[in-house]
Amino acid sequence: MKSEGWIDVQIRTAVDPAELLGLLADPVIQGGWEDQGVVHLYWPKQQWSTDAYARLCRALQELDPNGSGEEDIRVEELADQDWNRQWAESVRPIRIGRRIVIRPSWEPVALQAQDIEIVLDPKQAFGTGHHATTRMLLEWLEDLIHGGEFVLDVGTGSGILAMVALRLGAASALGVECDPVAVDCARDYARENGFGSTLGVQCGTLQDVDPQGTLRPDVVLANLDRQTLVQLCEPLAQYVSHGARLLLSGILLEQEQEIMQTFSKAGAMVCQRREQEGWVAVELLMAESCEGYVDV
C-alpha cells in the first residue's frame, strides 16, 4: 500500500494483538504485534482519525475492562522507511519448544535434523508464535501429537497451530475462524507452506461449521478470549465427552478460576496447566479421567 506515512499506535496492555485486531475489524490496519508488553498497531496516516482512536479505546475497554486507559496509549508518526524497518524487525525468526521454527520468508534459518519449519510473513491474520498464549500451545503440541490425529483449531487466526500440528505428524486439521480476512490469510499461509487437502480452513463460528456436533477430533485447540471461551463452553465440552483432548489458551491468570468452574460444570476437568507471562493454558479431559491440576 502506498502511503504518505504511518501512525504507530503503541498500547501498554495485556490484551492479545490478535483479539484486539479481530474486534477492531479495520481493514486499513497494516500490522500488529506485541513487544515486551506493548502492542503496536499501524494505520496509514491518511486513515488515522479521532473516530479510529475512539474505536480503539472502546475495543480495549471491551477486552479488558480493568486494563489499559488513554494514559497507556501513545501515538507516533512514522515515515514509510521507518515503518518498513520496524515491520521487518518485529518478525525475526523464532524457535519454540524443541523443534519448531517460525520465520518470515526473508530470513533463512539453518535447521537442525528434527526441526519443523513454518514460513509466516505477517499479514492481517495474526498468531505468529510470539505471544505467550500461542507459544504455550505450540510447545504443548510437541508432546501431544504422536501421529495420525485429527486436530480442530477453533479461532484459528493465521492457522499457525493447525500447521504446526500437521508438521508434527497429525493426519488432518480443520481451522475454524469467523473473521473472513483471517480466513483468506490462513488459506494463503497454508498454500505457501505446501499444505494441501490435509488442512482445511472454514469461515464461520463453531456452531456454523459443526452445528450437530458430528465432528470427532482427537485434539481440539481454542486460543480465545475469556468471553468467547465461556460462550463456547458447551460445544467445546461436547468434544471432550467423545474422547478428545481439549487445550484452551488466551486465559489471563485472574480469569482462570471462572473459566475452569464453567467447564467443570459441563463435565470437563483440568488435567494439566501451563503459565507464561501472566497467561494460562490448560488441558481438559472428561471429569472421571482427571484427578486435578498438574503444573507443567
Image (cartoon, rainbow, N blue to C red):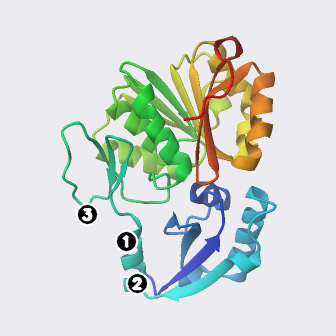
What SS does tag 1 mark?
helix
Which residue is nearer to you in this view: 147 or 121?
147
Pinpoint residue 289: horizontal percent, then vertical percent. 64, 13
Q: Is residue 170 visible?
A: yes
Question: Which residue bears the numbered disc 3?
Answer: 106
Residue displayed at 70% across by 76% down: 72
* Nearer-the-camera pick, 186 or 160: 160
Element on which disc 3 rests: loop
The alpha-carbon separation of the residues under discs 3 and 1 comes to: 11 Å
Q: Residue furthest front?
A: 295
Left-right relation of 229 to 122: right
Locate residue 169: give its quadrant.
top left
The secondary element bearing badge 2 is classed as helix
Q: Quadrant of the C terminus?
A: top right
| Residue at image coords 44%, 60% | 123
- As displayed, is residue 80 above or below residue 64? below
Q: Say the numbered circle drawn on residue 82.
A: 2
Q: Residues within 10 Å of mark 3 (few under 14, many from 20)?
A: few
Q: Looking at the rendered structure, which numbered label has been put on residue 64?
A: none
Evaluate whether residue 249 shows in this view.
Answer: no
Q: Which mark is on residue 89?
A: 1
